[in-house]
Image (cartoon, rainbow, N blue to C red):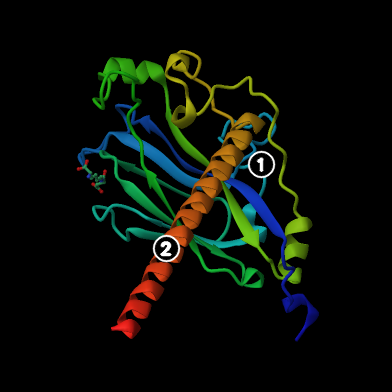
Amino acid sequence: MATDRVRVRGLSIHRPIIYGNTASLLTEKETSPSGHTHKWTVAVRSAASGPDSDIVGGADDLGYFIKRVTFKLHDTYPNAARNIDKPPFEVSETGWGEFEVNIKIYFVPEAGEKQITLYHHLKLHPWLEGEGSVPPPLEVATKLGPVHSWQYDEIVFNDPFQSFLNILTAHPPTPLPRTSKKPVPYNTANPASLEASRGGVPEFTQAMEKEEAEKLEAAKKAVFMEQERLRLRLHEREKELDLLKQQLGET
Ligand code: SLL
């Protein structure tokens, strides 16, 4: 076996990504008889934003480990499954409604990994905490500026092939800023901070990275506890079974 097809056991390596969308209202000039009200972009990007960039995330080109991203749009769109085979991994469209986007990420062949699936609810309307799910009136929405709905995530590769590990380590991700002077993304925004998130482009920070690590840790713990519970139950049932067999033997 070629040495580069050897797995590096016990090693985990991850790459931070964000996925989500931005949306803004079409201007009067842009509206067409189709009834579309918004333009939007749904994307998978590196979590860090470029210096002085006014896009959310996207500092790093993810083409070194991602081969293709398929965005499956609502069936009202022609060719609803959009395959994007090189960065930027994004689709821009216009429309009138929100819907669930199914996002499949395919990795380069060196990875030897199956694709992963993510789901994102395409958000067009700004949402105001405590006011239900009703979009705010147009005058208010216009003042709030573009809607940003982004999710931070980490793609984890366990026991990677040596050749793939080499590729990954040759492309270290741009670190996230410790703090952000930019507004926080709506999805993770504290309700009180809506004022702060108005206007400007959100940015992901190390605080959010930490939050994600803590969530993962909590989930791991929960899985472990559940395993323990099931193991104990299995053990009890086995004892019960033994006892029953014994009783059967005695009769
Ligand atoms: C809804 N469940 O009813 C959603 C569906 C579909 C949105 C939203 C594009 C349509 C077109 C479009 O905005 N579809 O191509 O004209 O709200």
Residue topped by disc 1 = 59
- In front: 183, or 230? 230
Q: Which residue is found at the position 65% from the left and 51% from the top?
A: 15
Q: Position of residue 237 (x, y in %)?
A: 39, 66
- Give the x, y percent position of residue 21: 44, 39
Q: Residue at x 32, y 58 (%)?
A: 80
Query: Against 7, is 202 above or below?
Result: above
Q: Residue 107: x, y in percent?
A: 58, 65
**Cα separation between marks 1 and 2:** 54 Å
Considering only order in the chain, which callout, 2 or 1, is on the residue closer to the N terminus?
Answer: 1
**Quadrant holding the N terminus:** bottom right
What is the count of numbered marks? 2
Q: Nearer the viewer, residue 28 or 38?
A: 38
Q: Does the closest atom of ligand 1 sit within 8 Å of the Cβ of label 1?
A: no
Q: Quadrant of residue 72?
A: bottom left
Is 198 situated left or right of 39 in this image?
right
Picture disc at residue 236: 2
Q: Nearer the viewer, residue 122 or 206?
A: 206
Q: Is residue 248 above or below residue 183?
A: below
Residue 154 is left or right of residue 79, and the answer is right
- Which class describes the residues within 10 Å of circle 2: few (<14), some (14-19), or many (20+)? few
Q: The residue under label 2 is which amino acid type?
A: Glu
Q: Note whether 60 is above or below 161 in the view shown.
A: above
Residue occupying image coordinates x 33% and y 83%: 250
Query: Where's ligand 1: which quadrant?
Result: top left
Residue 55 seen from this side: yes
Q: Is residue 57 visible?
A: no
Circle 1 packing at 10 Å, graded few (<14), some (14-19), many (20+), is: some
Residue drawn at the location 59% of the way across and 38% of the way down: 214
Residue 165 appears at what percent x and percent y?
A: 74, 63
Secondary structure of the residue carrying numbered label 2? helix
